[in-house]
Amino acid sequence: MKLIFLGPPGAGKGTQAQRIEDAFDIRQLSTGDMLRAAVAAETEIGKQAKDIMARGDLVPDEVVVGIISDRIEEDDCKNGFILDGFPRNVAQAEALDAMLLEKGIALDGVVELAVDPEVLIGRILKRAEESADGPREDDTEEALQHRLRVYEEQTAPVAEFYASKGILKTLDGMQEMDEVTQQIHAVLKEI
Ligand code: AMP
């Protein structure tokens, strides 16, 4: 099964993607995690991405498109994958379409977790406090406000893009985590 999880920062995409990864034996591919690993390892991509990420902007499309294109060809993605944090704008969604067409892969569905923007800042700051690794560099209130603006301006239109293709399923991400997981399972059964 090949899926995309969409939703603003703090919507619970990562947690839900991990649960679905385990349940269906498909790989969660988080571009944010991959970029943070690149920053930590001080690779060329990491050096290019570090400051951009810290202020909550998007790293260049060609960087993330290249990362995903290589990653989905790896063996552990044969059974499927969940793209978490990608595509982040319509240009990336179009690049993904072209890439999948070329590789002969079809997307099965796009799951959007809809969350009231007002609760997001509180959720993320709480997550930052509770994280064993300490807060992320982009979990400051200023960077967060910026990430939410970037989401509204650049990523929200991605939902429209997939809605127009008829493969978008929007779920209520405001419910308890287990309830959201159940909703996702129900949607995936129909696919
Ligand atoms: P995330 O962990 O998904 O919240 O991503 C953290 C940061 O990584 C974002 O604020 C961006 O700076 C960068 N990033 C992650 N995914 C993408 C993407 N698909 N396109 C551009 N930048 C991304």
Image: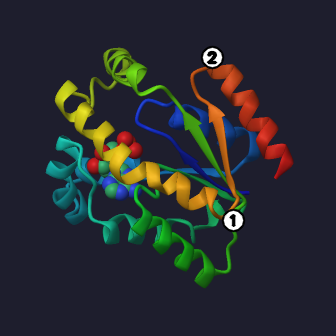
Identity of the residue drawn at 47% across and 25% down: 116
Q: Which mark is residue 176?
A: 2
Residue 184 location (% of width, % of height): 72, 36
Between disc 1 and disc 2, whose residue precedes?
1
Amino acid residing under circle 2: Glu
Judge from the rendering whether residue 175 lies leftward or rightward of residue 185; answer left or right.
left
Identity of the residue drawn at 69% across and 29% down: 181
Residue 134 location (% of width, % of height): 28, 23
Mark 2, other Cα within 10 Å: few <14 / some 14–19 / many ≥20: few
Judge from the rendering whether residue 111 lies leftward or rightward of residue 124; answer left or right.
right
Kindly state the secondary structure of the residue where label 1 is placed.
Answer: loop
Tell me whether the residue at label 1 lies in contact with that at label 2, contact meaning CB atoms closer than 8 angstroms.
no
Residue that mark 1 sits on: 78
Identity of the residue drawn at 70% across and 59% down: 166
Q: Which of 171 and 52 is in front in this view?
A: 171
Determine which quarter of the picture holds residue 10.
top left
